[in-house]
């Protein structure tokens, strides 16, 4: 694709004075790892891919299931049973052929986390369990990587940026993960399909701002209740 075609693809964001050609170059040179290609991961991946993030890694070992489709909008019913990470890669490459997508069809573990994360500039955690969230957090600390964090349940979502230019991390906010038996989850409590779309898009927005050195959340946790539209930002 020519420089002219590339400009036409991205010009609506390039024309923003806060971004410009320099900001777009930063996006093109960036390497972002997204953990999870589910409810949060799908909108995260779509928006950072179409914005022009040059290299995107996707970590997900799961297969597409029918009950995913109301919120995981990268997939269709014909793809049920296929790998999420590989299917997401194929779809994103069609959406933006200018970028590179790397699919890791495996579960993130203490054995492989450092190896997978080490070549990326920052990590976006779209996982759905505390074991993975704390593993991602701790590995980012060890490697000096920024972590964009988000979570959802029912009608509520959370958003934060950890370990960015010396800011605090997940353990400063919640020192230890809760007992899994005490934690509600979407499998048992449900979620409205638009919620992960909203929180995932907010996570993508923070990711793009981090790459382009724009102001981002700093030792702040955003709590978003979409049932009554309450928006709270807590300092920690």
Image: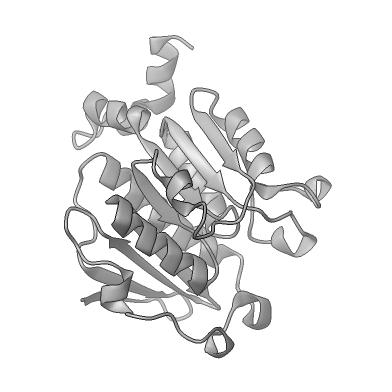
In the picture, the quarter occupied by the C terminus is: bottom left
Q: How many marks?
A: 0
Return the x and y of residue 40 as percentages of the image width and height.
Answer: 53, 59
Residue located at (55% from left, 68% from top): 128
In the image shown, does 177 or 147 lie closer to the viewer?
A: 177
The picture quadrant where one finds residue 70 is bottom right
Q: Is residue 2 left or right of residue 72?
A: left
Q: Is residue 44 above or below residue 169?
A: above
Q: Is residue 104 left or right of residue 29?
A: right
Task: Please name whichever residue, 7 or 234, is drawn nearer the observer in this view of the structure.
Answer: 234
Residue 102 placement, left or right of 12:
right
Reply above or below: 62 against 180: above
**Residue sitting farthest toward the front:** 111
Q: Nearer the viewer, residue 162 or 217?
A: 162
Q: Is residue 137 visible?
A: yes
Residue drawn at 52 percent across, 62 percent down:
127
Q: Which residue is rendered at x = 43% and y = 80% of the image?
A: 177
Determine the residue positioned at 67% across, 76% down: 187
For residue 223, which quarter of the picture? bottom left
């Amino acid at each position: 694709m020519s420089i002219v075609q590339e400009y036409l693809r991205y010009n609506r964001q390039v024309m923003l004075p806060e971004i410009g050609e320099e900001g777009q170059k930063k996006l093109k040179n960036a390497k972002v790892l997204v953990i999870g290609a589910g409810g949060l991961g799908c909108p995260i991946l779509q928006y950072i891919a179409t914005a022009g993030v040059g290299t995107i890694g996707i970590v997900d070992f799961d297969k597409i299931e029918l009950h995913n489709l109301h919120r995981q909008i990268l997939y269709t019913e014909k793809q049920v049973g296929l790998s999420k990470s590989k299917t997401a890669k194929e779809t994103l490459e069609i959406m933006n052929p200018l970028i590179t997508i790397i699919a890791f069809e495996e579960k993130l573990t203490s054995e492989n986390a450092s190896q997978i994360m080490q070549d990326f500039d920052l990590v976006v955690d779209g996982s759905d369990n505390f074991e993975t969230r704390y593993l991602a957090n701790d590995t980012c600390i060890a490697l000096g990587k920024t972590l964009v964090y988000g979570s959802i349940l029912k009608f509520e979502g959370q958003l934060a940026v950890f370990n960015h230019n010396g800011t605090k991390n997940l353990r400063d906010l919640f020192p230890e993960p809760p007992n899994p038996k005490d934690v509600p989850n979407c499998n048992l409590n449900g979620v409205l399909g638009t919620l992960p779309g909203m929180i995932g898009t907010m996570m993508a927005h923070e990711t793009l701002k981090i790459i382009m050195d724009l102001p981002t959340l700093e030792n702040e946790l955003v709590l978003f209740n979409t049932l009554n539209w309450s928006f709270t930002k807590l300092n920690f």
